[in-house]
Structures are given as structure tokens and as C-alpha cells.
Amino acid sequence: MSQHSLETDRFSPYITFSRDEWKRLRDATPLSLSEEDLSKLRGLNERISLDEVAEIYLPLSRLLNLHVAARQELYNATYTFLNNRTKKVPYIIGIAGSVAVGKSTTARILQALLARWANHPKVELVTTDGFLYPNRVLEKRGIMHRKGFPESYDIRKLIEFMARVKSGDPEVKAPVYSHLAYDILPGRYQIVRQPDIVIVEGLNVLQIPRGPRKQTPQVFVSDFFDFSIYVDAHEQDIYNWYVERFKMLRHTAFQKEESYFHRYANLTDEEAVITATRIWQEINLINLKENILPTKDRAQLILEKAADHSVQRVKMRKL
């Protein structure tokens, strides 16, 4: 790292790496994804390349692999100390960030890379969308327009899921959410069966309540994380990506009659921009500023993206 970077970071809880500095931390980690693999992991309007995977995500997967290995060694020591009375539990990674910032793609790429390491081949990805209240509940409570805000999640159910996963339960069920139906799918579940790693991705996974602290102890989703990542970008860039994605969806998911947003399928470009901008300003921007962005500095690692979706800086919390 440069002398300037070291001076800048001296009073920060983070060490900041430029793209060039970060990519050198890949060491000899082989690139195990092909272009075909990557095409299945990309988001709708993301142009992430194999170079991006090699320079950003491979070093990150190497870092996480070292963390998991250290945790496995600690488990083995505890296992011996307690005379084999502890359950092996998964290493849990939380990924947070705004709508349209690319956190889902980040999560999928990390899942694919981490599963290729020999010491933790079983990696599950769970999104917190499944823990949103069903639309009928949101409508009854008058908060349908605040879907994605903290109050729209069944936090009790999400905490129970996290606690059971972290306790090493043989099978834990997570509800399944459909972006097409824009609702929870009744009777559909993702079954998590004691994986080595669980990646939990969602808007508010680093959220803690604001205001006076309650006297009774509170449990937060992030309490169960062994490592946390925040995917960051300038507000204007995220807005541009959101509008671009909305315009593209007119020709894909919105075309399906069963889509909740089918009514937007035939909007003109101008109408689509106006509609997407309104939704962004009335819902997603407010959620970003009030609930998501304030949690950024709780993450152990921050990926800072440029206007072309590429990660230009990585900030890693000091030990």
C-alpha cells in the first residue's frame, strides 16, 4: 500500500485498498469459474467480467477461506476441550447493500467460488426476501408501499431461522419469495442442511434498531454473522442502474402475465424512466438513506463500485 493510503487510514477503522493493491492479494488462487459459469451468475444489467472475478472476488474468496479455516481450527479445539459435546456449525457471511447495487450477484459469485475450496464445499445462499411478510399482511397493515423497509420483515421468524442454523440443526426451512409474483410462495421452502458456509443476503441484514436501548437484551440478525460485507456505490450510479434494470425488465419478466408488474410491460422509454424514478424516490431512496446506508460502517468489508459496476476500492476493517 502507498504511504498516502497508510496515512489516510491511520484514524479509520478500515484499511483501504485500491483495485491494484487488492488484486495482488489473490496470490496463486486459481480462477475456477468459466465465462459460461459467470453468465449464469450475472444480474440482469451487470457487465461483470472474468477479470473482475479474478481481481476482486478471488482475493475475497481467499480471505474468507482463511477465516473459515481458522474458525474450523477453533471448532476442533473446542470440540476436544468439551469432549466431543459441541455441534459443528456453519460459518455465516452477511451481504448488505441497496436495491440494484449488485449484492445478489456478489453473493452468487462468492457462493460459486467458496464452494470450490476443498475445506468447505457445501455453501448455501439464503436471501432475506423470503422473510418479508406476505402481501396480504403488508396490505392489512397499510405498509405495502414500504416493502423492503425493516418493518416489512418478519424479524422474529428470521432470527429463529438464524439461531437454528447457527445451532447446527440438521434441517432448517427458509420461506421462498418470488420476484415474479412479488410475494411469498405459500408452502415453498428452501431447506438448509448443515452446510459449511451460509451466505445471507439482504437490504437490512446489518440493521439494528435506533433510539433508546431497551433494558432487555436484543438479538439482531448480524449477531449471527462471522463476516459481513457491504456493497457500496454512489447514489446517482445506483439510481441509474435501477432505471436501466427497470427498462430491461419491460422486455423480460414484466412481459409475463403472472408478473405483479405486468402493467408496466408496454411503457415507452420515457414512461419507464418516469415510473422507475418515482418508485426510486418514493421508496428505494428513502430506504437507502434511512435504513441501509447507516449500516455500512458496521460491515467488516466494503466493496466500493464505480459507475460501470466494477469495484475500484476495498475497505477492510482492522483487526
Image (cartoon, rainbow, N blue to C red):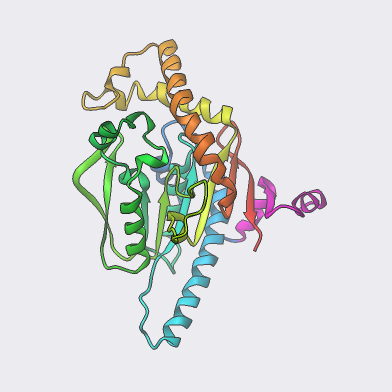
Q: Is residue 24 magenta?
A: yes
Q: Nearer the viewer, residue 63 or 224?
A: 224
- What residue is drawn where x is 30% and y is 27%? 253
Residue 5: horizontal and vertical position, in percent? 77, 50
Q: Nearer the viewer, residue 282 or 99?
A: 282
Which quarter of the figure is the C terminus placed in? Answer: bottom right
In the depicted structure, whether residue 259 falls above or below residue 189: above
Q: Quadrant of residue 184?
A: top left
38 relative position to 161: left or right = right
- What residue is drawn where x is 57% and y is 30%? 235
- What residue is drawn where x is 44% and y is 55%? 220
Residue 118: horizontal and vertical position, in percent? 43, 67
Q: Which residue extends farthest front?
A: 215
Q: Magenta residues, as a range?
A: 1-27
Is residue 206 visible to us here? yes
310 relative position to 138: left or right = right
Which quarter of the figure is the N terminus placed in? Answer: bottom right
- What residue is drawn where x is 42% and y is 82%? 79
Is residue 55 visible to us here? no
In the depicted structure, whether residue 65 falls above or below residue 105: below
Residue 316: horizontal and vertical position, in percent? 63, 54
In the depicted structure, whether residue 274 falls above or below residue 112: above
Q: Quadrant of residue 75?
A: bottom left
Q: Is residue 191 magenta?
A: no
